[in-house]
Amino acid sequence: MQRDWSTRVYDRSGNLVQILALENGIRREYTALDSMPSHAVRIFIAAEDKDFFSHHGVDPLAVMRAAYQNITSRKRISGASTITMQLARLIIPAQKRTLRAKICEAWNALRIERLLSKPQILELYLNSIPFGFQTEGITSAARTFFALPLAELTAEQLCCLAVIPRYPVGYNPLNNPELCAEKAAELYTAVFLHEKQPLTVETAAQVHTQLLHAARTAQRFRYPFNMPHYIEYLVSHYKAGDFVPSAAEQNISTAPALPPEWHITADSSLSAYTQQLLQTQLKKNAQARLRNGAVLVIENATGNILGWVGSNAYFDTESNGQINGVTALNQSGSSTKPFLYALALEQGWKPSDIVPDISMRFGKANAYIPQNFNNRFNGPVRFRVALASSLNIPAVYLLDTLGLEAYIQKLEQLRFQDIRQRGMEAGLSLALGSVPVSLYELVRAFSVFPRGGIMIPLRSFQNGGTADGFTEPERVYSEDTARLICSILSDSAARAKGFGFAATFKTPFPALFKTGTANQYQSLVALAASSAYTVGVWMGNFSGSTVIGKTGSSAPAAIARDVLLRLHRQSGDSMGTPAHHFAEPEYWYREPICALSGMPAGTACPTTVLEYLPSAVVHRTRSLNTVCCTWHNVEQGKVYTNYPEEYRRWFSHSSRHGSIIATPQTLRVISPADGGHFISNPNNRNGRIPLEVTGGKEDSLSVYYDNDSPFGIRRPFSASLPLEKGVHQLRVQCGTETLQLSFTVEAAE
C-alpha cells in the first residue's frame, strides 16, 4: 500500500531545512517500525487496540462490549474499532458513520490482514494516525506538539500524545494540558502500573502530577521553511523524473512519490548568509528601484550546489518574491562574453592579438552598430584587455569574424537551453548577451574555466542525483583555453581600462570576475569563481521595470565577492577548501610584447607587458632573433607610432601621438554598407552620406556614383555623397581593385 509521506530535507551538515507538507498542509512523516521506540509502540497499542496481536482485524469481543455499552447508555460510548479497522478507514474514508460503513470497514480490515503482516499494519497505522492540527503519524505528532524527535519523548509525553487522536480539539496538550494529563494518566496507569503495583490514592496523584508536567512541556513546533525556491525546484524536477542517476533508497526513476528523507548538498547557513547579503545590497540601492535578486553557489570539483537564493524574500508579494530567480530567464549582458572569447582562442586567436574598438557597422539592410557602455572608443585593444574590461565592440567584431553558427554550437555544448532559435534571431547582439538565459545555466557554464574546460552536471543530492540531463563530464574547451580565460578574468591590470581598480573585485586569493548589464540596466549579473567555488548573482526586477540610475553590476559583484570570502575563510571545515592559484597554460609561454600592438616587443616599443604566446610563436621569434613589432620605430632618437589604416577615423577624432600608415590591404568600403538603408529628412536638404574606404594598393581612388561623373580622392579615402531618395549604385576603383555596391535612401515618415 503506497502512501505519500512528508519528506524531511536535511542539508549537508544534517540541519533540518524543511519538512514538506502534503495536500492541505498536512505533515505525515514516515518512520520504520523497527526505528520507533518500543515503549512508544506499546503505549499506542494499549491506547487503541490492546488485543491487536490476537485478532484477525476485527475483535468480536470488543464489538459485543461496545454494542452493550452503547445500548445501555443510549449513546455512542465505544466504536470497537481495531487498529486494522482504523487503518482501513484511513485508506478508504467513509462519507458517513453508518452501520453499512462500519460493516465495509470491518470487511476491508479482514482484507488488509490477509495482505499484510501485523508489523506492516502497525507501521502503516502509526505513521498515518491523525492528530488534528494538520498532523498525521506519531513522528510528526511528536514534532508538532512537543517540538522533539519521536525518540526523545518520555513515556509521560508519549501517553499525552496517544490520547490526542480520541479527541484532538479537547485532548491536545497545547490548548488543554489539564484534560490531556487526566486522560493520559489513565493510559499511563494501565500500561506501566497495572501489573506492577496496586493503584493507591498517593500513586494516582503522583502519576497525575507527572502527566500534568509532561502536558505542560508541550510547545507548538515552528516548521522550518529554509531555501524555499530550491526545494520547490527539487520537488518539481523529482516528480517529473528528471533526476538521474537515482539512489536505491530514493528510487527516483520509478516512483513519483517523494522519499521520506532527502540529504542535499546545499548548506542552509550559507544560503541564509547569502540572502542577507542580497537584502543588504537591495536596501543600499533602494533609491535605484532595485527590488530583487538571486544567487547560486556551487563547488567546482563536484558540481554540488552549495547555496541557492531565489529572491529577496519568498513572501514578498509586492516584488514577486515567489518567482525563482535562479531558473528565471533574463538577459545576461556581458557575462557571457568569456564563452565567445574562449571560442576565439580555440580558433587560433591569442591574448596578445589586437581587436578593433572603433565605430563599426555590421550587417547590411538591418545594420547593427554596437556601442561601449561608456560610449567611448579605445582604438586598437589587446584581446586580453577587451575581455577583462568587457568592451562591446570587440566582442561583436569577434562574433562577426567567428560566425554566429559556430558560437551557437558552442553555447549548445555549454547546455544553454533553446539557444539556437533565439540566438539566430538575436544575430550579432548575441555577443552582448541579448538572449535570455538562466542564472543556473550561467553558473554551470562559467565553472568550466576553473575546472580546466570540463563541464560537469550540477548535483543536488549527497548521493549524486542531478537533473541536468547528463551525468558524465564533458570537455567543452581545451585545458589551455580554460587556463588562459582564468588568467584574463583574474587580471586586475587588464580590467582597469573598463572598471579601474575597483575594490569590488579584490580578494586575497586568485578569483575570476565577469559582470554584465542588460535591458537598460533591467538585469545586472555577476559571475565569480575561485579554484574551488563558482558564484552567480542576478539583480533586477521580476516585473521588468528598469533600474533608475546606472548602478552597474557592482552590487551583484560585491555579493559574489563576499560569498567567496566567506567560503575561503572556512578553510579546513566541512564547507571550505583553501584557494589555489590557477594553473599555467601548458603550451604557452609568457613573453614581453608591445602593450599597444600586441606583437613581440622590440627595442622601439615604449611600453611592454608579459603575455602568453603559443610555443610555436615563441620558438620562431627566438630562433630568428627578429623584432616583430611594426607599430613603433625610432627616427633621430624619437619613437614614432604608426597605426594601421583601419584606425584612421578613430585617430582623427582626437589629438593623438603618431600617424596612420597605409599598409597594403584588401580594398574595403566602410560606409555606406552594401544593401544599407538611409532615411532622408525633408527639412534637411543638405544631408550627406559619409563615404569611407580603406585598403587598396594605390594612394588614389576613383568614385562612380549612379550616373554622375566620376571623381577622385586621395588617401585617406574619405568623402560624402548626396542624400537623395531612391536606390543608388556605387563603384570604387583603386588601381586594379574594384568594388561595387548599392544602397537605398527612403523618405522619413
Image (cartoon, rainbow, N blue to C red):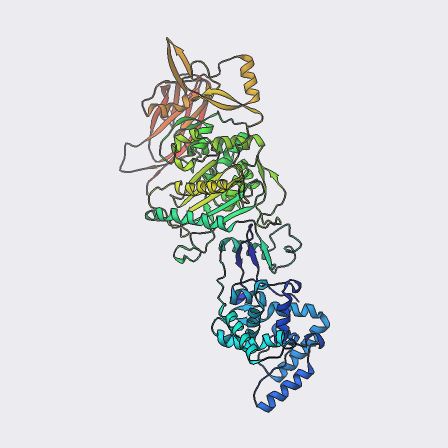
Residue ranking furthest to the left: 683
Q: Could you say where residue 425 lies in the image, as x and y percent from the top left? A: 48, 43
Q: Foreground residue, 638 or 68? A: 68
Locate the N terminus and report the quarter of the image it occupies: bottom right
Task: Name the residue located 52 percent from the left edge and 74 percent from the top edge.
Answer: 209
Task: Name the residue located 50 percent from the left edge and 20 percent from the top edge.
Answer: 591
Residue ranking furthest to the right: 114
Q: Foreground residue, 522 or 62? A: 62
Q: How many marks?
A: 0
Q: Could you say where residue 747 lies in the image, as x and y percent from the top left? A: 33, 39
Q: Could you say where residue 404 lies in the image, as x and y percent from the top left? A: 51, 36
Q: Foreground residue, 286 or 700? A: 286
Vertical relation: 522 (above or below) 374: below
Residue ranking furthest to the top: 636
Vertical relation: 347 (above or below) 150: above
Residue 710: tell me if it is visible.
Answer: no
Q: Foreground residue, 221 or 607? A: 221
Q: Could you say where residue 218 lies in the image, as x and y percent from the top left? A: 50, 68
In the image, taking residue 126 as reference, residue 560 lies left or right, namely left
Locate the C terminus and report the quarter of the image it occupies: top left
Residue 195: tell me if it is visible.
Answer: yes
Task: Name the residue located 41 percent from the left edge and 24 percent from the top edge.
Answer: 646
